[in-house]
Image (tube, helix red, strand yellow):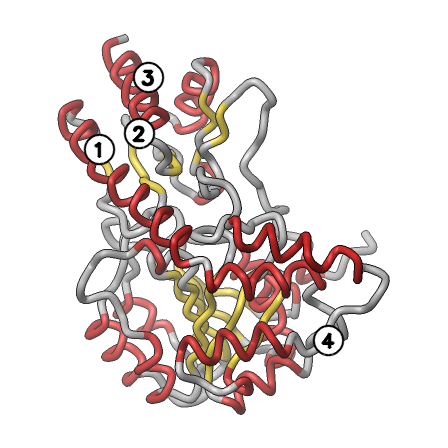
Amino acid sequence: MLLKASLRDITPYSAGKSFPDKVKLSSNENPLGPSPGAVKAIEAVLGGLHRYPDGASTMLRDKIANIHGLTREEVAVGNGSDELFALICGALLDTGDLGLISENTFSEYRFSLKLFGATVESCPLKEGCYDLRGLAAKVKAETKILFLCNPNNPTGTYFNHRELDNFLSALPSHVVVVLDEAYQDYVDAPDYPRALELIKKYPRLMVTRTFSKIYGLAGLRIGYALGQEELIRSMLTAKQAFNVNLLSQAAGAAALDDQQFHNSSREMTLEGKKQLYKGLDDLAIQYYPTQSNFICLSLGIPAEELYQQILDRGLIIRSLKSFGMDRHIRYTISSKEDNQRFLDILKELKSC
C-alpha cells in the first residue's frame, strides 16, 4: 500500500449524481442557473486566457473586503471553500494534533484534517443540530482546529448568535475555529450569528463563504474566507501560486454586483421553503426546519431505497447514507413546479 497511513480510512467524497433524463435536485445548486452578471464578466476576459491570473486575487479580495467592511489582508479566496479548508489545515497542523468536527456534517472537514495528518474526533448531532456544549467538552490541549457548519449541511439546522458567542468565549485560545457559512445567504432567522462582529472579537475565528450557491457559480469553484489578518496570512502561506483562475476572479467580482440575481435566488428559495413545509405537513412527513436552500426529511425507510424510488420517477435527490443518516434524504429547494412534483412523488410513495 503506497498510501500514507493517515489516509487509508478516508472514503472518497460522494458527489450528487447526474442522469441526462432526470431533474437533478441533489447538490444544492441554484435552479436559476449562474448569475448573468458573472457570465458577462467571463465573456469579457476570454481574450486574456493566455495570461496567468493575478496570484493574489487582488480585485476580488478588495471587493469582498469593501462589502464586509474589512481590509484586503482580512480576506482570502480559494478554489472553492474546500481549498480553504485544506489550506488552513495545511498551514497549521502538525503531527499529533487533533481536529474536532460534528458527526453528520460536510465530509470535507474530516478529509482536510486527515489529509494533513490530524487525528479526528467528533461529536454527534443533537436532534439534528450541532451540540456546541458537547463539542466544547471534547476540546483537549492537542485540539488545533475545530470545524462548524452553520446552517448545517445536510440538516439545514442552525445555532444562533448568542450560542456561538458563548461557545467561542469558552474555548481555549489555541483552538482555531473554521465556521463554514456556505448557505448564509438563504437564512431568514433573525438571531443567526453576526459573523463579522465575532471575527473582530475572536482572533482564532475564520468564516468561509461560497459563490457556488446563491450566485450559481458551483462550476467555477470560488470560495472566500474572512478573519483577522494574522490568521489569514498564516493560511495563505500554504496557498499555491495561482489557485483562483482568471474566469473565476472576474465572475466572482461581477456576481457580487448582481444584487437582482441574488435577491431572485433567495426569494425563490424562501417561497419554495414555505411550499414544502405546507406539503410535508399535510403528508405528515418528518423534516428539519431549514435555513438553507435544501430540506432534510425522512419517511422512515432506508435512504437508498427512497432515493431509488424517487429516481425512478424522474427526480435526483440525495441519499444521506454517506452522511451517516441512513433513513434521511436531502432535497434541493427548486421551482414551484419541481417542488410540487417532489411532493406528489412523496404522496404517491406514502400511499404505497
Mark 3 secondary-structure assignment? helix
Give the quadrant of residue 172.
bottom left
Whole-number angstrom distance, CA of label 3 to CA of label 4? 48 Å
Kind of residue at disc 4: Gly
The residue to which callout 3 is attached is 345
Residue nearest the viewer, comparing 125 with 342: 342
Residue 57 or residue 126, whichever sits in front: 57
Residue beneath the point at 44% across and 67% down: 147
Front-lying residue, 112 or 214: 214
Mark identifier at residue 275: 1
Q: Amino acid at mark 3?
A: Ile
Point out which mark residue 336 bears.
2
In the rendered structure, which disc, 4 or 1, sits on the residue that comes first in sequence? 4
Query: Which amino acid, mark 2?
Result: Lys
Q: CA distance from mark 4 to mark 2?
A: 42 Å
* Position in image of residue 27 (x %, y %): 49, 40
For residue 242, what is the image quadrant? bottom right
Residue at figure coordinates x 18%, y 64% from the top left: 190
Q: Earlier in the sequence, mark 3 or mark 1?
A: 1
| Count of residue discs | 4
Residue at label 4? 55
> Mark 3 or 4 closer to N-term?
4
**Helix, strand or loop for disc 2:** helix
Identify which amino acid the numbered label 1 is placed on. Answer: Gln
Spatial CA distance of label 1 from label 2 is 8 Å
Q: Are marks 1 and 2 in contact (CB under 8 Å)?
A: yes
Estimate the x, y position of residue 289 in percent, counting from the top left: 22, 45
Query: Residue 326 in the image: x percent, y percent?
Result: 39, 35
Q: Where 123 sits versus 272, above or below?
A: below
